[in-house]
Image (cartoon, rainbow, N blue to C red):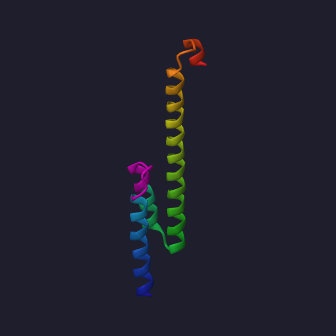
Amino acid sequence: KHQTEESLTKAKEHGKDNVDKLKHLSQDQKDKYKHDIDDAKTKEEIDNIINKAKDEDNKHQTEESLTKAKEHGKDNVDKLKHLSQDQKDK
């Protein structure tokens, strides 16, 4: 039994390290996932929480990429010299 508790503790530490490495989550989001990991009773629960955190991180990364692409596109349209401002604003 002691070995099981020890491996669960190691899995929790490893899981929290993984959450900390995610670049597109706020500190509050990371703290929530780490709290959920602390409350987990099995390695499967920990893995599920990590997967949810990674999914959310990927979602935020995609949103950030889309926002940057839109801004880049708008900048390119603004640089076009043969369009009126009205055409650029459409």
Residue 19 percent across, percent down from the top left = 43, 60
Q: Is residue 28 magenta?
A: yes
Which residue sits at x=49%, y=37%? Answer: 68
Decide which of 38, 57 is in the foreground and name it.
57
Which residue sits at x=58%, y=12%? Answer: 86
Which residue is at the far front?
82
**Count of numbered circles in the view:** 0
Which residue sits at x=41%, y=70%? Answer: 14
What is the quadrant of residue 15 in the picture? bottom left
Residue 83 percent across, percent down from the top left = 57, 15
Q: Check the image and report above or below for 32 versus 62.
A: below
Q: What stretch is highlighted in magenta?
A: 21-31
Decide which of 32, 14 is in the foreground and name it.
14
Residue 40 percent across, percent down from the top left = 48, 69
Decide which of 26, 89 is in the foreground and name it.
89
Residue 53 percent across, percent down from the top left = 50, 57
Which residue sits at x=54%, y=72%? Answer: 44
Q: Taking 9 as reference, is 84 left or right?
A: right
Q: Is residue 8 magenta?
A: no
Q: Check the image and report above or below for 24 versus 79.
A: below
Q: Check the image and report above or below for 1 versus 83.
A: below
The quadrant of the image that shows the C terminus is top right
The quadrant of the image that shows the N terminus is bottom left
Decide which of 81, 3 is in the foreground and name it.
81
